[in-house]
């Protein structure tokens, strides 16, 4: 056997070992890629479920916001109505109280008094 033959055998052995190592690495990479694909499928399913839940939550929140907006609008209208009615009602009650006091004084025989003048404080 010549030196060239030995070198050829050594080179063939090294190439065979390198090919075996590369094949093993390739098998591990393929297995890892399959696991990664499976994890991505699970992640996609979970993400889609979360997005569906978020969509439902946003729809419910929008409905609640509309409901609260209607309640606030109703409360504002009631407040406006109360303000519109309060002044005339207070005046009517004051008038009724004044008439009732005057009638009581007339029944008791008191002479009607002119309304007292209120002093306004200087502000």
Image (cartoon, rainbow, N blue to C red):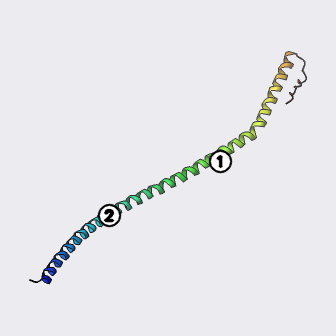
Marker disc for residue 112: none
Name the outermost residue toward the left: 1
- Is 6 or 100 nearer to us in this picture? 6
In the rendered structure, the answer to whether residue 97 lies left or right of residue 46 reads right
- Residue at x 29%, y 63% (from the top left corner): 35
Residue 117 sits above or below residue 82 on the image: above
Rendering coords of residue 20 (x, y %): 19, 72
Mark 1, other Cα within 10 Å: few <14 / some 14–19 / many ≥20: few
Q: Position of residue 95 (x, y in %)?
A: 82, 30
How far across and down, in percent of the image, does residue 88 sit?
78, 37
Q: Quadrant of the N terminus?
A: bottom left
Q: Which numbered dot is residue 73?
A: 1
Measuring 18% from the left and 78% from the top, which residue is drawn there? Answer: 11
Q: Is residue 49 left or right of residue 90?
A: left
Q: Earlier in the sequence, mark 2 or mark 1?
A: 2
* Label 2 crowd bin: few (<14), some (14–19), many (20+), radius 10 Å: few
Instruction: Give the left or right position of residue 7, taking residue 50 as reference.
Output: left
What is the quadrant of the C terminus in the image?
Answer: top right
For the point 38% across and 58% down, which residue is it? 46
Name the quadrant containing residue 18: bottom left
Q: Nearer the viewer, residue 12 or 49?
A: 12
Where is mark 2, residue-wise? 36
User: What is the CA distance from the residue labelled 2 to the residue labelled 1?
Assistant: 54 Å
């Amino acid at each position: 056997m010549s030196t060239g033959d030995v070198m050829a055998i050594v080179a063939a052995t090294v190439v065979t070992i390198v090919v075996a190592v590369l094949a093993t690495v390739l098998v591990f990479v393929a297995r890892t890629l399959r696991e990664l694909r499976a994890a991505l499928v699970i992640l996609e399913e979970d993400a889609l479920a979360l997005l569906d839940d978020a969509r439902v939550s946003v729809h419910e929140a929008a409905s609640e916001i509309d409901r609260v907006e209607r309640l606030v609008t109703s409360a504002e209208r009631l407040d406006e109505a109360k303000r519109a009615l309060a002044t005339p009602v207070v005046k009517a009650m004051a008038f009724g109280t004044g008439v009732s006091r005057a009638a009581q004084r007339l029944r008791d025989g008191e002479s009607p008094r002119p309304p007292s003048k209120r002093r306004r404080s200087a502000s």
